[in-house]
Amino acid sequence: MSSFNAPGAASTYMLVDENHRSINDAGFATLGPGAPNFRMIDWPATYHNMAAGFAFADGHSEIKKWLWSGTNLDTPGPATKGGVRSPDIEWMQERTSALIVK
């Protein structure tokens, strides 16, 4: 757990409930906080009343209710989207791990 320094184990998700329309591999990602643009690589689930489950590195879980209607990937389409400023993508960016290069 000591390697989780930013954002920390309690704020780093390890598992996410992915939308069935974007399941195509074992990956799920978004660019980290402070990235110059917004990009989702695959999409979170929305079939729990516009919410998805996240499991964090410290062992706790959260249900995240989505605020932006564009988070709902209700029709088949590209699994990667970008360029949209969204409070939901920002929420995930703040909880996404990243390699720190020294």
Image: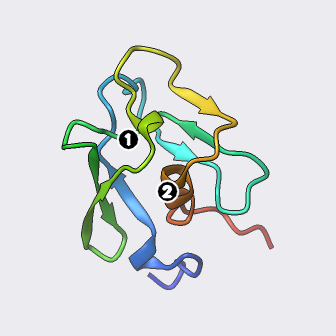
Give the farthest residue toward the bottom: 2
Count of picture labels = 2
Tell me the amino acid under the disc marked 2: Met
Q: Residue at x 40, y 62 (%)?
A: 13
Q: Disc number at residue 16?
A: none
Q: Residue at x 50, y 85 (%)?
A: 2
Q: Residue at x 28, y 49 (%)?
A: 52
- Quadrant occupied by the N terminus: bottom left
Tell me the amino acid under the disc marked 1: Pro
Q: Nearer the viewer, residue 20 or 86?
A: 86
- Secondary structure beneath dot 1 equals loop
Q: Disc number at residue 44?
A: 1
Question: Compared with residue 74, is residue 6 higher up or lower down, i.e. above or below?
Answer: below
Question: Compared with residue 43, is residue 65 higher up or lower down, i.e. above or below?
Answer: below
Q: Residue at x 27, y 65 (%)?
A: 62
Residue 47 is situated, as x and y percent measured from the top left of the image, at 22, 36
Left or right: 52, with 10 as reference point: left
Question: Compared with residue 98, is residue 31 higher up or lower down, i.e. above or below?
Answer: above
- Disc 2, disc 1: CB below 8 Å? yes
Image quadrant in which you'd find residue 11: bottom left
Give the farthest residue toward the top: 76
Residue 4 is situated, as x and y percent measured from the top left of the image, at 52, 78
Q: CA distance from mark 2 to mark 1?
A: 10 Å
Q: Disc number at residue 92?
A: 2
Question: Compared with residue 18, is residue 66 higher up or lower down, i.e. above or below?
Answer: below
Q: Earlier in the sequence, mark 2 or mark 1?
A: 1
Residue 44 is situated, as x and y percent measured from the top left of the image, at 38, 41
Residue 95 is situated, as x and y percent measured from the top left of the image, at 50, 65
Dot 1 crowding, Cα within 10 Å, few <14, some 14–19, many 20+: many
Left or right: 23, with 39 as reference point: left
